[in-house]
Amino acid sequence: MSHLKREDPCIATLIEKERIRIEETLDMIAAENHAPPSVMEVLGSILNTKTIEGYPGKRFHAGCEHVDEIEDIAVQRAKELFGAEYVNVQPHSGTSANLAVYFSVLDVGDSVLSMGLPHGGHLSHGHRASITSKCFEFTHYGVDPKTERLDYDRIRDLAYKVKPKMIVAGASSYPRLIDYEKIAVIAREVNAYCLADMAHLAGLVAGKVIPSPVPCCDFVTFTTYKTLMGGRGGVILAREEFGQRLNAAVFPGCQGTSAVNLIAAKGLIFKLAMEPRFIEIQKKTVENAKILAQSLNAQGYRIVSGGTDNHQVLIDLTSKKLNGAMAETALESAGIVLNRNVIPSDVRTPGSVSGLRLGSAGLTTRGMGHSEMITIAGMIDRVLSQSDDPTVLNKTNHQVKKLCRRYPVYA
Ligand SMILES: *Cc1c(COP(=O)(O)O)cnc(C)c1O
């Protein structure tokens, strides 16, 4: 980055510091992953400056012959990878993708049934702070208080009661598999569209380690930067019959020009996702999450829902002296980076919360496996049980850095 260093040493230094932070800490944020260097090359390429509106062959500016090909390739690869009839690779983010799906088939004021945020749902599923709740009438379902898993009978009851035009299946913090087929059947019974938001899970679905919602749902949205590790952005998959409405809902409905560098990175990751290395990482990501859950449980932590089927582990700190916020801070000072999270039936206030959300994707991508998960679970326990002892935090941080050096992110 020689130009940057010369022209803006301040930003250049901060990027270098951030690079070191990534190398020297354990990224256990479930919504993050490390993108391959080739993805980074595409993101920082000259594609960034091309202005495009519309779709390949139907643009509003000249000079699009090469970027048209790039978008066509990205769409084609996503169709193949996910077995989808229609693909839109233009959404800037998962939220943009969801907005476009809503506006493609719903009218303002229509009712939608989705998972509530306190139970694991996402802001863009009708949270009161999101524009989605101002446009549509959301009703929220949650998990069964005992099993902490989705209660499909309750979802059916709610669906018959509120008669939604759309049911959303998907979550930001839910460590179990979602039975998309069941939700799709409920949607058909009440004549609602079915949207699966697999933002967190796209990499696991692409690697075929968990079931895909594509065969049974009308719409599937996802982000490309979580388990899929393809740089930032959103994607919509759908049945062909919704194609025209979705095209219009993305552009010009919800967005203007789309980012060609992001579209190219999506195309690249769809290719890499068909290769054995990617599939192996996704398999190991799920295995590693299970080992984390088992080890922490063995050390006396209650795991929400009793375990995990994906890349997430939710720990319940209700009976511990540290709340989620304090735990997050203590772990961060030891180099273990993750986030506090509300858990179902949380007794603490929104600021402090009782949960910690752990993700295994970043650790797995940099090559860590079984024995590292056990080591890391031990470090987490040590920090949480002795968080007021600075020497414990220091010693753990030292140990984290040593472990990280064995598994460089960008060698
Ligand atoms: C992360 C996430 C999104 C949104 O992604 P942005 O790119 O931040 O807009 C949408 N839905 C779910 C379920 C998510 O977890």
Image (spheres, rainbow, N blue to C red):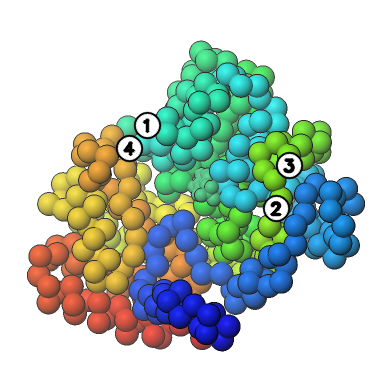
Which comes before the other along the chain, label 2 or label 1?
A: 1
Is residue 359 depicted above or below 306 in this figure? below
Q: Amino acid at mark 1?
A: Asp
Whole-percent x, y for residue 31 in the image = 46, 56
The reply to whether residue 357 is in sight is yes
Q: Quadrant of residue 77?
A: bottom right
Q: Nearer the viewer, residue 380 or 209?
A: 380
Would you call the spot at circle 3 few (<14 residues within 10 Å), some (14-19), or many (20 or more)?
some
Find the distance from the CA under tag 3 to the CA under tag 2: 9 Å
Tag 1 secondary structure? loop
Q: Image check: 331 left or right of 6?
A: left
Q: Quadrant of residue 239?
A: top right
- The quadrant of the picture occupied by the N terminus is bottom right
Residue contact at pointers 2 and 1, CB within 8 angstroms: no
Would you call the spot at circle 2 few (<14 residues within 10 Å), some (14-19), or many (20 or more)?
many
Whole-percent x, y for residue 187 in the image = 62, 25
Q: Which residue is mark 1?
A: 144
Label ID, residue 344: 4
